[in-house]
C-alpha cells in the first residue's frame, strides 16, 4: 500500500492527531510536526517525531499531505501556502472564517491541482454510517423533522488560552468552534438547509462570543430541524433525533462520538424493518472517527477519487454559521444558499470588527 508522507502543524489539538498518525503507519508516514512552542516540540521529539518551528520548515521535509491544527485565524493562509507548495491539506474546524474564503480555497485548488479535506470526523461512526446507507437506499422516506443538541461544558481554564473566546482569534463561539461537527451530521443526514432562524447569547462565560444558541432550520425539502447549543451543561452530551416517514432514529449521547453506536432505529412497519435488515446484512461500517476519515482520505488521494469530505461540505457548514449569526443580529430568517452579493459572505463578524481585519 502506498504510504503518504504527512506532517502536522499546530500541537494543541494536533497532539491527538500525532498519536493517531503514529498508529496509522500502514498508510501514513509521519515525517514531522511544526509548532512555535519549544516545550511542544520537545514532547514530539520524545515520541521520535522530527519537530520544527513553523510551516515553512515543515513543507521543506517533502510532504504529500499536511494536517493543519493551528488557531482558526491562521488557516486560510496556511492552506493556500501548502497547496502552492504542491501539498494536499487536511484541516481542523473551523476551516476558514467566511464563505468567501471557501471560494478562494476552491480557486487555489483549481490553480494548484491539490485538494483540501476539511475534518468532519463525526460522520465516521457506525450509527451515522448505517443511517446514511438507509437514506441512500431510499428506505427511510422523506425527513419530517430532526433535532440536534450539543450540551457541553467549557470553563475559565479552557478560555485561558488568549485567542479563545474572541472574535479576532477564534472567529466565533459555540456554533462555530463546538457544535459545527454535530450540525454537519444534521445536514448530512437531514438534508441541505434552505432557511435559518437563529439566536445566539452569552449566558455562561465572560467571553466576547456566544456560548449559547438555538435555531430552526428548514431544509430544501421542507423538513423542520432544530438545533440547540450550550457550553454550560453540568454533564456533557451530544444527541441527534430524526423522524422520517418510515423510520425514527436517535443517536447515542456520547459528547464527542455521537456518530458511534448505540443508535436506536424504530421502523413504522415490520415490512420496512425487514427490508432494512436485508440491506444491512453483512455490512461492515468503516473505521470510526478521525481514523476513518484519514483512511478514506488516503484512498481518495492515492486513487485519484473524490475526497470523502471536501470544500462543498465546508461551504454548507459555514453558510449555516453565517446565516445563524445574521439572523440572530437582525431577528429575520436568512435564506440559503447565500447569494453571491450577500453582505455577510466575506465575514460573519460583528460590523464594528470587520474593518479591523
Image: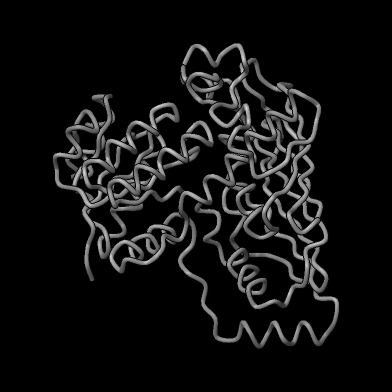
- Looking at the image, residue 19 sits to the left or right of residue 126; the answer is left
Query: What kind of colouring is applied to the model shown?
Result: one colour
How many numbered badges does the structure rendering display?
A: 0
Please state the horizontal and vertical placement of residue 78, each as a whole percent of the image.
32, 34
Write down the quadrant of residue 213 in the picture. top right
Taking depth in this image into account, of 112 and 50 the one nearest to the observer is 112
Write down the quadrant of residue 301 in the picture. bottom left
Q: Residue at x 66, y 74 (%)?
A: 134
Please state the horizontal and vertical placement of residue 168, each as a whole percent of the image.
50, 18
- Looking at the image, residue 23 sits to the left or right of residue 321; the answer is left
- Looking at the image, residue 75 sits to the left or right of residue 182; the answer is left
Taking depth in this image into account, of 10 and 107 the one nearest to the observer is 107
- Looking at the image, residue 140 sits to the left or right of residue 117; the answer is right
Q: Residue at x 22, y 67 (%)?
A: 2
Write down the quadrant of residue 206 in the picture. top right
Q: Is residue 27 above or below residue 52?
A: below
Quadrant location of the N terminus? bottom left
Q: Residue at x 63, y 36 (%)?
A: 321
Q: Residue at x 38, y 28 (%)?
A: 74
Please state the horizontal and vertical placement of residue 153, each as a whole percent of the image.
64, 33
Farthest right residue in view: 268
Please state the horizontal and vertical placement of residue 245, each as a whole percent of the image.
83, 70
Taking depth in this image into account, of 255 and 123 the one nearest to the observer is 123
Q: Is residue 343 above or below residue 89?
A: above
Amino acid at each position: 500500500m502506498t504510504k503518504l508522507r504527512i506532517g502536522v502543524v499546530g500541537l494543541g489539538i494536533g497532539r491527538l492527531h500525532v498519536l493517531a498518525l503514529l498508529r496509522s503507519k500502514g498508510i501514513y508516514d509521519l515525517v514531522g510536526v511544526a509548532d512555535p512552542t519549544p516545550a511542544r516540540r520537545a514532547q514530539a521529539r520524545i515520541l521520535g517525531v522530527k519537530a520544527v518551528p513553523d510551516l515553512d520548515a515543515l513543507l521543506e521535509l517533502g510532504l504529500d499531505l499536511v494536517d493543519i491544527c493551528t488557531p482558526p485565524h491562521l488557516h486560510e493562509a496556511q492552506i493556500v501556502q501548502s497547496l502552492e507548495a504542491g501539498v494536499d491539506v487536511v484541516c481542523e474546524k473551523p476551516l476558514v472564517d467566511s464563505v468567501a474564503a471557501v471560494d478562494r480555497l476552491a480557486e487555489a485548488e483549481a490553480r494548484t491541482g491539490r485538494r483540501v479535506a476539511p475534518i468532519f470526523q463525526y460522520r465516521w461512526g457506525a450509527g451515522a454510517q448505517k443511517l446514511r446507507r438507509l437514506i441512500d437506499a431510499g428506505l427511510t422516506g422523506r425527513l419530517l423533522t430532526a433535532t440536534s443538541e450539543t450540551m457541553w461544558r467549557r470553563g475559565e481554564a479552557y478560555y485561558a488560552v488568549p485567542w479563545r473566546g474572541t472574535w479576532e482569534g477564534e472567529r466565533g463561539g459555540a456554533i462555530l468552534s463546538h457544535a459545527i461537527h454535530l450540525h454537519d451530521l444534521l445536514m448530512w443526514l437531514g438534508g441541505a438547509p434552505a432557511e435559518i432562524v437563529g439566536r445566539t447569547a452569552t449566558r455562561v462565560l465572560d467571553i466576547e462570543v456566544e456560548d449559547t444558541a438555538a435555531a430552526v432550520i428548514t431544509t430544501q425539502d421542507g423538513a423542520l430541524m432544530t438545533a440547540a447549543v450550550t457550553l454550560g451543561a453540568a454533564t456533557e452530551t451530544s444527541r441527534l433525533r430524526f423522524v422520517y416517514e418510515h423510520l425514527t432514529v436517535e443517536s447515542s449521547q456520547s459528547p464527542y462520538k455521537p456518530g458511534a453506536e448505540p443508535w436506536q432505529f424504530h421502523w413504522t412497519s415490520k415490512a420496512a424493518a425487514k427490508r432494512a435488515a436485508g440491506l444491512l446484512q453483512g455490512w461492515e461500517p468503516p473505521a470510526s472517527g478521525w481514523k476513518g476519515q484519514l483512511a478514506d482520505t488516503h484512498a481518495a488521494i492515492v486513487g485519484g477519487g473524490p475526497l470523502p469530505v471536501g470544500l462543498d461540505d465546508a461551504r454548507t457548514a459555514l453558510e449555516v454559521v453565517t446565516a445563524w449569526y445574521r439572523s440572530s443580529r437582525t431577528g429575520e430568517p436568512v435564506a440559503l444558499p447565500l447569494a453571491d452579493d450577500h453582505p455577510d459572505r466575506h465575514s460573519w463578524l460583528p460590523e464594528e470588527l470587520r474593518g479591523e481585519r
